[in-house]
Amino acid sequence: MLDPRKSIYRPGGFSQRMAEIEPFRVVEVLARATQLAAGGADIVHMAAGEPDFVTAAPIVEAGQAALARGATHYSQAAGIPQLREALSRHYADVYGLDIAPSRILITPGASGALLLIAALLMNPGDGMLMTDPGYPCNRHFMRLVEGRGQLVPVGAGSNYQLNAELVQAHWQDNTIGAMVASPANPTGTALSQEELTGLSGAVRSRNGYLLVDEIYHGLVYDGSAPSVLEVDPDAFVINSFSKYFGMTGWRLGWLVAPEAATAEMEKLSQNLFISMSTMAQYAALAGFEPGTREILEQRREIFGQRRDYLLSAVQELGFLVPCHPQGAFYIYADASRFTDDSQQFCLNLLEEHGIALTPGVDFGHHLASQHVRFSYTTSMDRLELAVERLAKVLG
């Protein structure tokens, strides 16, 4: 009989990988901000990577209609055919690309897409080049499948992005590919078609894989962000209904893969997910209707106005923003004029002044202690209040 006084865990504790997967600090900031707000504090939320708008009414109504007609059973592991076909038309309409629906798999958020790609491509000990700073969960997904995120320090000189020269300089014997985001979190910078072409060529010359996170496509305020599929049909693309389509809580994403990889990825999806939320998939279909797109475009314009206001304001306050954020809803700012400990700086702003920002240490190691990320996912009047409070704090 098991002695209840003894630990049920083996002497070595949990798996070694758990010690190497760091907390997602922005979630901790959000939890503390919510706790303070529940206690009566007036918090300006500028930490979350989530649109403040509720899901557009036509999408919600489509989800409700799906529930009402009984669309509550499992779907195919790769997603309902109607949604894969709608995405195929989307790539034709927006990018002029002919992407077969069979190459598109629906996933539980962009995170599900990244898990499938990591599991498909990486053997234990393999490495994947990625930017530092960058979205922190990317390297943790690699670690989960016993691979490694090989962080490449980037700055203003490369627009905070990987390029052909950096790939050449940092490629290692165990490197199997490179991952970028365009537009990127936390910097908002995007890759041009020429830059994508150079990056693709550098990776392909080493027989590597190119992964591109395009989840902020649609939320671009200066020009447009080309898809990597315009220059490299064999790239793996990760996307989501969370950002532009405003469906964060519905947990729905997709990936585009080379035809040769789709059967194996569907096999993985069968085992890992069984299927995605059926009602969420039917809801997402409404995102492609003209009336819904009009709503989403109006919201994109509002995000652009917020970007313009906040970018100017933080620079006037003394933060440095060397690269113009073209998309997403973030400003990655050098706060070295005010601190050399961004985590403590953000903690003080939250606890003492009701301003929730994300410290740079959430996004990597390169100069992280002197950077903070502003998210303009709150109304203009709240952004103005945050700037007013910051001006008082920073003198």
Image (cartoon, rainbow, N blue to C red):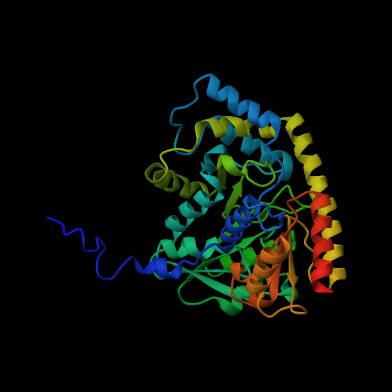
Quarter of the image for residue 321 reads bottom right
Residue pictured at 73% horizontal, 64% vertical: 353
Say whether residue 205 is left or right of residue 196: left
Tell me, yes or no, if residue 348 can be seen here.
yes
Quarter of the rendering occupied by the C terminus: bottom right
Give the farthest residue toward the left: 1
Query: On screen, 76 above or below 14?
Result: above
Q: In this orientation, which residue lies closer to the viewer: 356 or 169?
A: 356
Query: Residue 249 at x, y = what percent?
Result: 58, 42
Give the farthest residue toward the top: 69
Residue pictured at 56% horizontal, 44% vertical: 254
Query: Residue 65 at x, y = what percent?
Result: 59, 22
Residue pictured at 67% horizontal, 37% vertical: 55
Say whether residue 89 is left or right of residue 315: left
Say whether residue 163 is left or right of residue 119: right
Quarter of the image for residue 359 reads bottom right
Say whether residue 83 is left or right of residue 173: right
Query: Residue 126 at x, y = what percent?
Result: 44, 69
Q: In this orientation, which residue lies closer to the viewer: 150 or 375?
A: 375
Tell me, yes or no, if residue 187 can be seen here.
no
Query: Residue 210 at x, y = what percent?
Result: 57, 61
Residue pictured at 44% horizontal, 28% vertical: 73
So how many labels did they put on this image?
0
Q: In this orientation, which residue lies closer to the viewer: 61 or 269?
A: 61
Quarter of the rendering occupied by the N terminus: bottom left
